[in-house]
Amino acid sequence: MNLFENTALGITPLDQNTAILAKQRMDSLVKPIGSLGTLEDIAVKIAGITGKIKNTIQKKCVVIMSSDNGICDEGVSCAPKIITAIQTMNFLKGITGINVLSDFSGNDIKVVDIGIDAHLTHPLLIDKKIRKGTFNMAKGSAMTRDEAVAAIEAGIEITTQLINEGYNLIGTGEMGIGNTSTSSAIIISLLGCDIDDAVGIGAGLTPENFEHKKNIIKQSITINSPDSKDPIDVLSKVGGFDIAGLVGCYLAAANKKTPIVIDGFISATAALVAYKINPLTRDYMLPSHQSAEPGYKCIMKELNLEPILNLNMRLGEGSGCPLAFNIIEASLEIINKMATFEEASIDDDFLIDMKGQ
Amino acid sequence: MNLFENTALGITPLDQNTAILAKQRMDSLVKPIGSLGTLEDIAVKIAGITGKIKNTIQKKCVVIMSSDNGICDEGVSCAPKIITAIQTMNFLKGITGINVLSDFSGNDIKVVDIGIDAHLTHPLLIDKKIRKGTFNMAKGSAMTRDEAVAAIEAGIEITTQLINEGYNLIGTGEMGIGNTSTSSAIIISLLGCDIDDAVGIGAGLTPENFEHKKNIIKQSITINSPDSKDPIDVLSKVGGFDIAGLVGCYLAAANKKTPIVIDGFISATAALVAYKINPLTRDYMLPSHQSAEPGYKCIMKELNLEPILNLNMRLGEGSGCPLAFNIIEASLEIINKMATFEEASIDDDFLIDMKGQ
């Protein structure tokens, strides 16, 4: 077996016993049962993931997979392809949205060239380039099956190394002009959803270009006939290196029992592919925000997950993750630090004069 | 004019010019226009509130109004009335949900006795007690009109003092067994909404007790016939001291051009009353989370505001505010620290080799 198969097949279920104990502790805290809603659910889920009732985030990191998409030749995007390279360099300069939000949340970022159509050099750029961009999926397969597996394995290697270095909360990010088109093509192929439910305006298309984008996505699916039962076939025919790399991140996080946060539409598409490879991966995922791209909803319905933030964001880059990290850490503080009813009743050293009750 | 009238009538509109300049800066940052969604809107709104394009939160505070409700005599709540006093002391001991979340977010809390039905002493407890709990609104007016105004003025005084001390982000919290009943009665009286859209299970009622709660709320409205055109009449007849105190917080924050965060259902009810007193207050409010109580939605629809968090929370205490504070501060970091396209193009010192494009 190769690294991909080993990782995917080595994923085991959540530790239900620890999750039950965490739920019991949550129910014993000084609040009405369930009144902290999703904050309670997150802490219980993470207990099931790690096998410990109390968890603390030591180091957290957003992995940003950057790559180009051959489909851009068809004019499906409102931004030129070179923006992938330019914005990737901007990540490394520390001046973009994900940088500012990461600094605020206190997480690191790792920027990966997994297939940018340019030669970039920077001491902090992780070179995992498969090829300088995928082929144009409107004319044939975006990549070979071997390339898809290689990109997944790049994501596995990076995430496994991060976890080995002590990172215990991972976020997913991406940069790749054209990757809302590949994401839409993947979810239509895997879920059979309607094109109008799966395709959005990306970074801001005009109505005319939006119709063109839908036609090109339809054409790409028709030409490639991806096998809906074979997620690697779908990924290689109508996907991108960025999405494939993130699939590897999800597989490795689940394999290493580490919570991993879904950012927006493209990250969620990778989460869906990982789920189709091994449904157990779903239990290790935490969604961040409700993306403004319509296809996001189809994915969450399939994964039976509910995003915690509703911010109408559609930036990508992993920008939802630092915000979600804050909520996740708050939920861990609740289970770690709130008093139980038993603890609260001890040491009642201030006077409560109930006269007149 | 008294403090209440002075404060309410002294509220002026947002600074639209500064908001426009903030929007222009937001649109010049290295991202697709609008792609950070609500994060962009929040920063622009706060620029309009303060009259400055770039803002930094110096000190932030959740004000928790604690008081008892006479309606508890009718058995509308699943918790005994004494919990108001006990949990208020727990706030001061630092062991509750709002304490843990506030420590995490780095905000202070101020705990106010505005009408607890017990005599509490603690060096950190702010004594603004109007009376030991309201009268039973199912049998007559919960308080006099003068008491309602006095409670509002208590909220004005506390919030004004906080702002004078340098707090520039305020949150609203409450503790008062029975206060989902008063909140439901207020919103039905002010908005004419259906009882099934306005009443929820509070801290966790059984179906039978839930029906009873709805009947008692209907009875309270019938007996008091509050004047839907007169928010103070509604507040005094079917409200509570906690809600009235929070109305004062909203009025003072708007008067002092300071952003103020709505927590859940009860805080939102107070926001609605403040809005009915002076609609300009709405522009100074930032909602935090979508409360699990159904009436919350009616209020947001009337205020035309959209909560940013979807956490299925129904704790109260102001617990949504620290989480929202984080998002708000993240939005300010975006406008303060992200590079503009112009700045990004300067100093392009790393090689991008575009050969092969």
Image: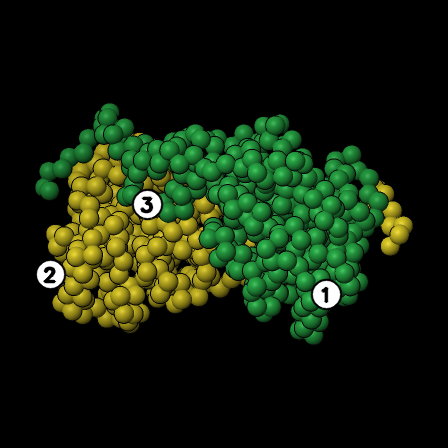
Chain colours: A green, B yellow
Residue B329 to residue B305: above or below = above
Q: Amino acid at mark 1?
A: Ile
Q: CA distance from mark 3 to mark 2?
A: 33 Å
Q: What is the chain letter for disc 2?
A: B
Q: Are marks 3 and 2 on the same chain?
A: no
Q: Nearer the viewer, mark 1 or mark 2?
A: 1
Q: Is residue A332 left or right of residue B2?
A: right
Q: Position of residue B325 (x, y in %)?
A: 48, 46
Q: Amino acid at mark 3?
A: Gly
Q: Are marks 3 and 1 in contact (CB under 8 Å)?
A: no
* Residue behind mark 1: A223
Query: In the drawing, what numbered circle is on residue B139?
Result: 2
Residue, x 62% and y 65% (percent of image)? Answer: A199
Q: Amino acid at mark 2?
A: Lys
Q: Position of residue A180 (x, y in %)?
A: 66, 59
Q: Is residue A242 left or right of residue A9?
A: right
Q: CA distance from mark 1 to mark 2?
A: 74 Å
Residue B353 to residue B295: above or below = above
Q: Position of residue B32 (x, y in %)?
A: 68, 58
Q: Are marks 1 and 2 on the same chain?
A: no
Query: In the drawing, what numbered circle is on residue A254?
Result: none
* Residue behind mark 3: A34
Asked whether B121 or B215 is in front, the reply is: B215
Residue, x 31% and y 54% (percent of image)? Answer: B266
Q: Position of residue A122 (x, y in %)?
A: 79, 38
Could you say which quadrant of the image residue A205 lies in? bottom right
